[in-house]
Image (cartoon, grey):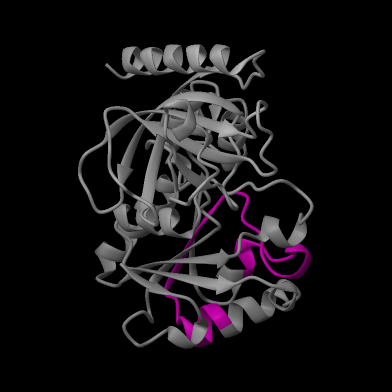
Amino acid sequence: MKQLTALSDITQTEQGAVIIIGNFDGVHRGHVALLRAARDIAQANNVPCGVLTFEPHPRRLFRADEPPGRITPCTIKAARLDAAGMDFVLSIPFDWEFASQSSDYFIQEILQNTLKATHVVVGYNFRFGQLRQGQPSDIRDAGIHVTIIDELQQDGGDALSSSAVRQLLRHGDIEKANHILGWDWEIQGQVVKGDQRGRELGYPTANLKLGETIHPAYGIYAAQVCVQGEDEWHKSAVNIGIRPMFEVPVAQVEAHILDFDRDIYDKILRVRLVKRLRGEAKFDSLEALIEQIEKDCEQTRSVLN
């Protein structure tokens, strides 16, 4: 899949495509319904199928004071869109200048003049342009075919939405979040050097920064981890939070990989949480903490076996 980061990157190869528009944070099963519809239309007309999305996520611009909320940072989102069979993704820089553009500008300059879109696929609640005044009917009135997908909004009582996934992750309900996503949610990050507390206690950890990734419920998780570029997944007891015993200033991910003894500093680690075992806790002594860590490792083995 080709990744483009500016309108000037568009070439004749991408022009005339079926374009699906949205933020696609999470690329959940509701999103996949749109992607499949767009891909089917593109294949029927023998044209490319492309995603038009926005970076950073508009939430960062409009709700700058809120905690980090990305389900899928750029690299993971791109991988999920690639897996859905997209030919290219155009990530338009989203700033106040772009947010203030009229809906007419969006249609004429982006969809018609630059992309020369032949067909647009959007969700039932899609709005665009300044103050979200533009509607799908405006695109259709400009002479572009439009398909609106309004299916798969509910599944067994669960809303197929990014908001629902965020809420579930913040409550530590990984299984339900994965059900809505349709894939196993993961955190990715570069392994950085920490304060070596885990090593001193006999349980060394690979430490990752969460960055803009949503902070799932703090606590201890049974997880699978994999060094990016490798195939093997390893059992891991993972702490997410601020470690009440030592009070680190910023929440982070600390993965104690079971039966593992390699230097993976600076490598990208993929962390797939499987089950939340308990919340974070402050212990009366280091001995009590070490005893609990051992129990966490045993429970991790049990869950993952």
**Total label count?**
0
* Near-viewer residue (217 or 137): 217
- Residue 137 inside the magenta-drawn segment: yes
Can you give x and y, in whole percent of width and height, for residue 251 in the image?
63, 40
Position of 219 relative to 19 (above/below): above
Residue at the location (39% across, 18% down)? 297
The reply, left or right, for residue 111 in relation to residue 262 is: right
Nearer the observer, 277 or 94: 277
Picture coordinates of residue 122, whole percent (x, y): 52, 57
Is 62 situated above or below 140? above
Q: Quadrant of residue 62?
A: bottom right
**Which quadrant of the view contains residue 13?**
bottom left
Q: Quadrant of residue 271?
A: top left
**Quadrant of the rendering where the C terminus is positioned:** top left
Measured as percent of width and height from the top left, residue 258 is found at 32, 27
Q: Is residue 142 magenta?
A: no
Residue at screen point 53% across, 78% down: 111
Residue located at (31% from left, 71% from top): 48
Q: Which residues are magenta?
A: 110-138
The N terminus is located in which quarter? Answer: bottom left
